[in-house]
Amino acid sequence: MSSADHLPSAASYQRKATHRRWWLIISVIVIAILPNVLQDSYWRTNLIVCALNVMLAIGLDFILGYAGQLNLGHSAFYGIGAYVSTLLIIKLGVPFWPAFLCGILLSGTAGMALSIFAVRLRGHYLAIASLGFAVIVHQVLVNWISLTQGPLGIYGIKPPPAIALPGLPAVSFGDSANMFYLVAGFALLFYILLDRLVRSPIGETLTAIREDEVSAASLGINCTAWKVFAFGIGSAVAGAAGAFYASFVGTLVPDAFIITESFTILAMVIVGGIGTLIGPVWGAILLTVLPEVLRGFGDFRLVFYGVALTLAVLFMPGGMMQAAQVIRAQFAFLRSKLGAEGTQ
Amino acid sequence: MSTVLLQQAINGIVLGSLYVLVALGLTLIYGVLVQINFAHADVVTIGAFAAYFFTFNFGGNYLVSIAVALIVGAALGWLVNAAIFAPLRERSNELLPLIATIGVSILLQNVMLLWFGPIPYAFDSPYSNQVIRLGGGTFITGQNIIIVVVSTLTIALLYVFMKFTFAGKALRAVAQDRETAGLMGINPNHLIMLTFVIASALAGMGGAMLGPILVLTPFAGTTVIVKAFAIVIIGGFGNVEGTIIAGLFVGLIESYTTQLVNPGLVDIVVFSLLLVMLAFRPTGLIAEKREENV
Amino acid sequence: MRSAAISPAEVKALDAPGEVLFRGHGLNKSFGGVHAVRDISLSISQGEVFAIIGPNGAGKSTLLNLMSGHYQPDSGAMSFGGADLVGLPAHKRVRLGLARTFQKIRLFNRLSVLDNVLAGFHVHHDLSVWQYVAQGAAFRRNHASCVEQARALLSFVDLEPRADVTAASLAYGERRMLELARALATSPRLLMVDEPAAGLNSAEVEKLLDRVARLRARGMTIVIVEHNMDLVMQVADRVFVMDYGQYLFDGTPSEVQSSPAVIAAYLGM
């Protein structure tokens, strides 16, 4: 993974950085073009959901794939971000962006709290603890009716306020294209941030912790602190997604954040390629878009998730990234064979 | 007032014994494989549906349908082990099989959703309406008696099996040290399969008896399973006695919370208890703390 | 940025040679019913090679784990360079200069050989988190210097040509040496090695002893846990003998070799 960056030649380091820059430019262009290509509201909704799922998936991958913490309660942070920001706006009249920030901070804090709590627990116990946490959060959302209006839900949530840039017409987020730019823009931002972290010694530290905690401790790494850090960051990103979700959908019900949601995000991470960051982006896109494309076959979406996840784990645990590598290797092999035959 | 308390105790024990049936399967699997099987929930659901269809579409006897559910559960257990756990046993990653079972669970739930639809099935056992008065102003339905009797018998049989038969002892040997058990001429793979079959049979039975109590949808199992996890942790992963005690305990807590506090808070109470357990005694009520061997 | 990590090429004696570096007094550790370490007291001086030996099950590895912080003692006192160790977790002790290797080799198997060693430099990084995200010039300079030092360490254990290979694909003897190099990357003042010769062939053992001697020549304090007496005699300055978790004897190698109590303990097994 990162050892390729340690090749002695500065040239290859430069090459990789240039690669990344090109991908960044392409992504920005694609994001800019998409709403113009897909003009109907159904597909634009899908695009926005896609962007939200990307945020959720990369956040979970940071926790699961880099810090090695099996978090099955990601839906809770999604929900906390959504409800905290919305309630601040509706009940206290807080403007959108400060409320957004609070949503992120609170879900990040919740993530850190869960992590501190689970710090001594090994894999399976942490999984169950996070699941239990998610159930508790969901049940609180359902039962604290005076605060959240319970299963009836909160209605009439407005999109983020229009931004007026000097000299330009106001950018309204009621327009789904602009909403997509906003959400996708943030998704891209979060991706770049996480990517930077992962390519830094912080990423190496997390990898060390994931591979062997005892070993990492013997090298001076404070495993607890870093696990809490990773959990906080991953859950904060989920909180941001939640805040955007609420302001986009306009309606907030607790059942949007049941534990099944955690499993679908997990599926995106695994199918995409755990611990690769870019893999879960593709996984989120694939598992959001493909079931919509297959909609003609009936309500197959979740069956598809189940099949994809099971098959991935059984046959290609590295997900799409592993599949891509296998294909690339095959091509290289074929090319070398053809090259050899060509010279004969 | 004491009537209410006593009544809730009875209800709690009934509920608890069902939870024990489901949780025992999980704990047995964990004991032998050190793996969590998320698809266990769906075995419960499928057991419930199997019993339903046997009773109502096939016109069979309800009590026999419990046996049918047992067989269906056993078959499913065999399938899940053969398809998921056996192939993954070679891989060193201990969390991959768990994730695979999540995938299977999603798959099964949504296939059932497509097949059976989201509308709850009214599963009324012929015994649900028979009411028998016990002392002190309390009562119990015929269904609940069946639950308690069947569960107790099954658990007792299981206990005898584990303690006194060769297969049972072999199972405990594999749970303690798979390699050494293998060296003693026990085939761990066969025993793991046996464990799965037993565990899933228990789950299927549990489902058949839960059917009339729960809202029967494809998601019925999930409402039980997370609680079953809580029980397994409170009782101690792999610890049969602990699971039994914890299961009854959780059943009692649930019924008391429902009656005396607020039905909506049941899950919160149970899972807060779970988190408290994890904070202070993650290895369960009875097991001892072990420092990792470096 | 704080002072750069000290490379083994220039290990300076931070304390005067001969001064007591590590002190342990009345250490006890039990697991369930097993009293693995009973009332052990020891002191280790700067610059010496201190061997802990004893028959199997004597409690040597447990003692090492107490020293490194992977276990906490039930009772007793410990200090390193004057700093109190009791209650201090393992990762904090590394910052003080206590490094170790493990009896059962623990490497980051999926990482490359170089990455394994690089992981050891984290303890002495002192860049701010912002630097990690922005990855400016300071970060790049720091990184380049770490890579250079890591390669030097790999040369020290003859693994430099294999720097980009996955750790999992190394032979057993090479893995041992890699673990050693990684521990050295933390710039330790005291290095603890747990049964380093286990599983090595005679050529590899020779190489190991040679490296230990070279480190000692540069002034590093080394603690070796071994149950192979012959090996230890060649390289140790002082030998500490344990049996059944208790102190049996300590002295120079020749004193230990001729002690009737020690001989009885080994023959009695």
Image (spheres, coloured by chain):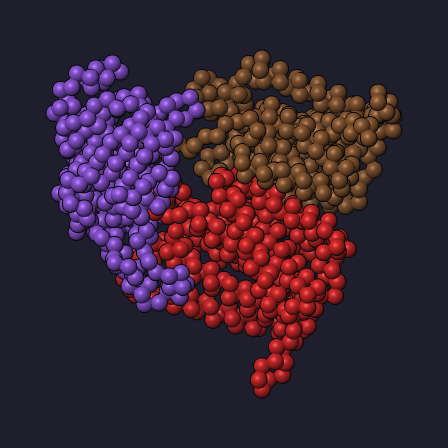
Chain colours: A red, B brown, C purple
Seen in the picture, residue A36 relative to A144 is either above or below; the reply is below
Residue most toward the bottom? A167
Seen in the picture, residue C264 relative to A50 is either above or below; the reply is above
Name which quarter of the figure residue C178 lies in.
top left
Q: Is residue A316 left or right of residue B265?
A: left
Query: Is residue A309 visible in this depiction of the protein?
Result: no
Where does residue A203 sit, x and y in percent of width and height? Answer: 41, 54
Q: Nearer the viewer, residue A294 or A264?
A: A264
- Residue occupying image coordinates x 63% and y 81%: A170
Name which quarter of the figure residue B281 lies in.
top right
- Residue occupying image coordinates x 39% and y 30%: C74
For the C terminus of chain A, the quadrant is bottom left
Q: Is residue B186 left or right of residue B160?
A: left
Query: Is residue B44 visible in this depiction of the protein?
Result: yes
Q: Is residue A222 left or right of residue A170?
A: left
Numbered circles on residues, count:
0
- Residue occupying image coordinates x 32% and y 24%: C38
Q: Nearer the viewer, residue B55 or B259?
A: B259
Where does residue B108 sit, x and y in percent of width and height? Answer: 67, 41
Where does residue A257 sit, x and y in percent of width and height? Answer: 66, 52
Seen in the picture, residue C66 relative to A333 is either above or below; the reply is above
- Residue occupying image coordinates x 30% and y 33%: C64
Where does residue C150 sit, x and y in percent of width and height? Answer: 25, 52
